[in-house]
């Protein structure tokens, strides 16, 4: 395994700076088996490319003076990449590499990151009137156990026209929920629609994703659980409140890791299933039926509050985030893991327009939201949180660890 010194030395040699945090160092130790692999990764980064351009750029005294400013750079990041620059070192290297905002904007438009944000434009676009036919097709493929099922689940995106309302306004919230109602073909959202009907006995023995037997899905889940536990970095015996635990895979792993787990889920059958799973393994976990907003009435404090692939089902995420501080111990961690963060989203936050989400909304009535990273990070900052981002490049996305800002 890479040593801390090797990682720091590689950063200084190639990027001219040290890693921005211990979390970044830890992520490199997990992601790279050798110094050569780390060096190859750094050489492929945008920051390294910009640094090389700045170092090799010929000096032309006749060239127009520099007009590129920090404010212009940040605005281009916001407008084109839908996020803030990573750190001050990145800002400095890009200002050094480009003379004008136009030059930098052209560079961004040619970047892999900008091209990745055009995800939806590369998929087949459909309109609201076409949703029923698309959902019926996906459902037929599922019933037939067709190999085309997975492809169909990621085949299209729904053209949802953004609203001009401010993302924090009541008008914006009404637009989101009205959009949900149209797609779901229901008068309004009800949390009871999040419940899933299944055979309790068989799924207790083989819950999702094991029940499907898909090696990649099983592998992604196991890797993601390991990533989340690693990123949380809790002391032995720490208390964890897990919302929306569903099939209980995270719950079981946390309990096996020696943490004192309290779990809350909206569905009674999930609560019963996970009780059976933990009991069969002689594990202790306090599990009960409830909603996200139980956070407003819980009179206990925890070392960590965890949302794993469930925060995006909350109809009022701002209200929920405001309730978390009082149920965290001093220094406690809010963990958002495997959430639907997508900078290709045509709006700051709202209904997830990707095909799998649209299918789940129309077929089951689930609420499927998605967020731009800049929106969720700005919101957490505004509500008094410091956030560390832990990259994990597989199907489950990244993990955000938030702690309260020091006064």
Image (spheres, rainbow, N blue to C red):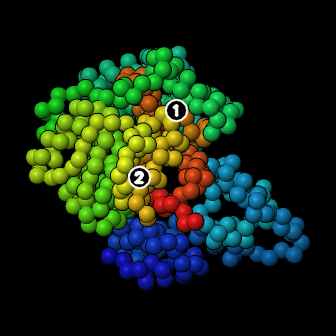
In the shown orientation, is residue 99 left or right of residue 364?
right
Place of residue 100 in the rendered image (x, y in percent of width and height, measured from the top left) = 80, 61
Q: Which residue is mark 2?
A: 327
Place of residue 353 in the rendered image (x, y in percent of width and height, measured from the top left) = 51, 32
- Disc 1 residue crowd, few under 14, some 14–19, many 20+, Cα 10 Å: many
Q: Quadrant of residue 59?
A: bottom right
| Residue at screen point 43% across, 63% down | 330
Place of residue 178 in the rendered image (x, y in percent of width and height, measured from the top left) = 55, 23
For residue 138, above or below residue 218: above
Q: Nearer the viewer, mark 2 or mark 1?
A: 2
| Residue at screen point 67% across, 54% down | 77
The mark nearer the N terminus, 2 or 1, is 2
* Labels 2 and 1 touching (C-beta < 8 A): no
Place of residue 143 in the rendered image (x, y in percent of width and height, measured from the top left) = 26, 22
Q: Which residue is mark 1?
A: 351
Mark linked to residue 30:
none
In the shown orientation, is residue 3 left or right of residue 369?
left
């Amino acid at each position: 395994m890479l040593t801390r010194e090797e990682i720091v030395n590689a950063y200084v040699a190639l990027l001219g700076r040290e890693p921005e945090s211990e979390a970044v160092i830890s992520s490199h130790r997990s992601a790279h088996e050798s110094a050569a692999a780390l060096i190859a990764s750094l050489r492929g980064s945008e920051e390294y490319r910009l640094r090389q351009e700045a170092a090799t750029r010929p000096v032309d005294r006749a060239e127009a003076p520099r007009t590129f400013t920090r404010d212009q750079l940040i605005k281009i990041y916001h407008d084109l990449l839908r996020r803030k620059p990573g750190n001050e070192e990145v800002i400095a290297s890009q200002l050094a590499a480009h003379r004008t905002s136009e030059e930098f904007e052209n560079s961004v438009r040619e970047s892999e990151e900008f091209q990745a944000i055009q995800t939806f434009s590369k998929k087949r676009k459909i309109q609201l009137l076409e949703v029923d036919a698309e959902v019926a097709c996906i459902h037929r493929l599922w019933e037939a156990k067709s190999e085309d099922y997975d492809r169909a689940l990621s085949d299209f995106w729904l053209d949802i026209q953004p609203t001009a309302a401010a993302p924090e306004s009541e008008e914006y919230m009404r637009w989101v929920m009205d959009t949900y109602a149209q797609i779901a073909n229901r008068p309004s959202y009800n949390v009871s629609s999040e419940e899933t009907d299944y055979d309790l006995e068989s799924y207790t023995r083989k819950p999702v994703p094991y029940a499907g037997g898909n090696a990649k899905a099983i592998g992604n889940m196991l890797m993601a659980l390991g990533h989340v536990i690693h990123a949380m970095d809790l002391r032995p015996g720490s208390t964890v409140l897990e919302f929306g635990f569903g099939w209980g895979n995270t719950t079981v792993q946390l309990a096996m890791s020696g943490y004192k787990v309290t779990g809350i889920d909206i569905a009674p059958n999930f609560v019963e299933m996970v009780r059976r799973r933990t009991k069969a393994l002689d594990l202790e976990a306090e599990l009960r039926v409830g909603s996200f907003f139980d956070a407003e009435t819980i009179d206990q404090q925890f070392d960590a509050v965890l949302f794993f692939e469930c925060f995006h089902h909350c109809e009022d995420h701002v209200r929920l985030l405001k309730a978390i501080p009082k149920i965290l111990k001093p220094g406690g961690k809010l963990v958002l893991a495997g959430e639907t963060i997508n900078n290709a989203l045509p709006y700051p936050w709202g209904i997830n327009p990707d095909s799998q989400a649209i299918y789940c909304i129309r077929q089951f009535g689930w609420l499927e939201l998605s967020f731009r990273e800049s929106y969720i990070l700005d919101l957490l900052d505004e509500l008094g949180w410091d956030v560390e981002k832990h990259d994990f490049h597989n199907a489950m996305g990244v993990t955000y660890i938030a702690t309260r800002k020091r006064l």
